[in-house]
């Protein structure tokens, strides 16, 4: 399997390490608009061909699949071109800037008959996969309530470097640089993390907050206007209600992701800070004594490994672009809710309902 990586920033390095370790996979080409960056990337990972133009890569490079690891605003045009060229695609999240773009990507991929996958990377958690299996088996009964968070502190600390001096972080704070803020950057993960085991969203009521960060709210070309925190009250299609919050101001947390599901017959909770394979459960006779037990879950393949296996077998990928578009629809509804100050029905929003449509 010959693979090209398009966009050679931070996530590309992660993908290169994982794909490079998989048997039967060759990193054959890399592309980035910054020639120095793509050539440095190629030297680091032993990639033989480099390009600074996507069209040239798709025309000349002999590759079976591409990884789209570019900034969010060019996911759609690159993926649609790659699909037309017959390349299988693993695309970073969020899939696009809005639901319409994401849906167009899914439709283009279906027309081309390719394998398409969005990198909701926390699907690699064995605990999350086990949680879904328990819910599907009815172990929790009817899901009644949930709570979840994705918390980072890089605006308050230097655990990942100094955001004030690094473009890799500054662009994430600027809508002019196509950032969807913390909601689009990591909120997209927690929305998938909740709904993968618990079920699809019916409605959301969202409050976005952008805090003062610098004099004049600008550092160089970056206007610091993207949201820093998102608070969401949500209802699932099942009727379950819950709360989700995400922030870059969560001092004391580096990259904390957690989920609790409460059903009428049992409950479960995941805290990835404790371990990706640890699942706490309160089931059966333990419900009456409010006793929690910790289960160590068996390993699951990484998204990269599952992507290659789907190409080899022809099996549909999960999460695919349709799933990415569904989560994008929830993001759009969250932005609409914040703008209107009302709850938004996710399905009506997808059908073109004006922002602020009440659930």
Image: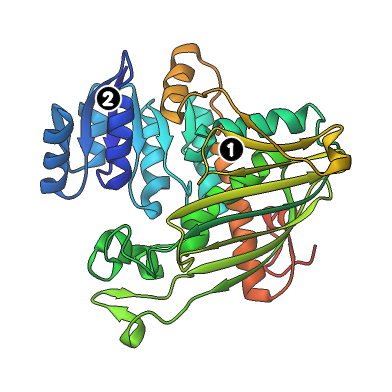
SS for tag 2? helix
- From what the image shows, is residue 45 above or below residue 310? below
Q: Is residue 102 left or right of residue 3?
A: right
The mark lying in front, picked from 1 and 2, is 2
Disc number at residue 20? 2
Visible residue check, residue 97: no
Q: Position of residue 206 (x, y in %)?
A: 65, 67
Q: How is the image coloured?
A: rainbow
Total marks placed: 2
For numbered disc 1, what is the local secondary structure? Answer: helix
31 w.r.t. 86: above or below: below
Q: Is residue 228 left or right of residue 60?
A: right
Residue that badge 1 annotates: 322
Per the model, the C-alpha gap separating discs 1 and 2 is: 27 Å
Dot 2 surroundings within 10 Å: few (below 14), some, or many (20 or more)?
A: some
Residue drawn 14% across and 28% down? 46
Quadrant including the N terminus? top left
Which residue appears at 17% of the width and 43% of the height?
Answer: 52
What is the x, y in percent for residue 117? Answer: 48, 33
Q: Quadrant of residue 31?
A: top left
């Amino acid at each position: 399997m010959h693979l090209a990586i398009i966009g050679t920033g931070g996530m590309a390095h992660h993908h290169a390490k994982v794909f490079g370790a998989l048997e039967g996979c060759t990193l054959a080409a890399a592309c980035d608009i910054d020639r120095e960056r793509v050539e440095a990337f190629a030297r680091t990972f032993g990639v033989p061909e480099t390009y600074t133009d996507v069209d040239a890569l798709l025309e000349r490079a002999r590759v079976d699949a591409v990884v789209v690891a570019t900034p969010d605003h060019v996911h759609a045009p690159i993926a649609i071109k790659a699909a037309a060229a017959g390349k299988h695609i693993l695309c970073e999240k969020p899939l696009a800037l809005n639901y319409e773009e994401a849906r167009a990507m899914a439709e283009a991929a279906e027309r081309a008959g390719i394998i398409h996958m969005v990198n909701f990377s926390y699907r690699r958690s064995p605990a999350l996969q086990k949680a879904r299996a328990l819910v599907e088996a009815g172990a929790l009964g009817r899901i009644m309530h949930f709570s979840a968070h994705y918390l980072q502190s890089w605006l308050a600390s230097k655990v990942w470097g100094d955001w004030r001096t690094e473009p890799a972080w500054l662009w994430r704070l600027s809508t002019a640089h196509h950032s969807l803020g913390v909601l689009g950057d990591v909120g997209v993960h927690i929305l998938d993390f909740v709904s993968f085991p618990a079920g699809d969203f019916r409605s959301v009521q969202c409050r976005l907050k952008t805090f003062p960060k610098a004099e004049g709210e600008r550092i160089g070309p970056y206007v610091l206007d993207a949201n820093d925190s998102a608070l969401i009250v949500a209802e699932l299609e099942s009727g379950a209600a819950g709360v989700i919050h995400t922030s870059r101001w969560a001092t004391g947390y580096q990259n904390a992701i957690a989920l609790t599901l409460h059903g009428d017959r049992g409950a479960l909770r995941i805290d990835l800070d404790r371990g990706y394979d640890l699942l706490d459960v309160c089931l059966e006779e333990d419900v009456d004594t409010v006793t929690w037990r910790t289960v160590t879950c068996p390993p699951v393949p990484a998204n990269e490994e599952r992507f290659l296996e789907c190409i080899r077998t022809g099996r549909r990928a999960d999460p695919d672009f349709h799933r990415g578009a569904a989560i994008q629809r929830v993001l759009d509804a969250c932005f609409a809710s914040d703008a209107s100050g009302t709850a938004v029905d996710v399905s009506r929003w997808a059908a073109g309902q004006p922002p602020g449509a009440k659930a």
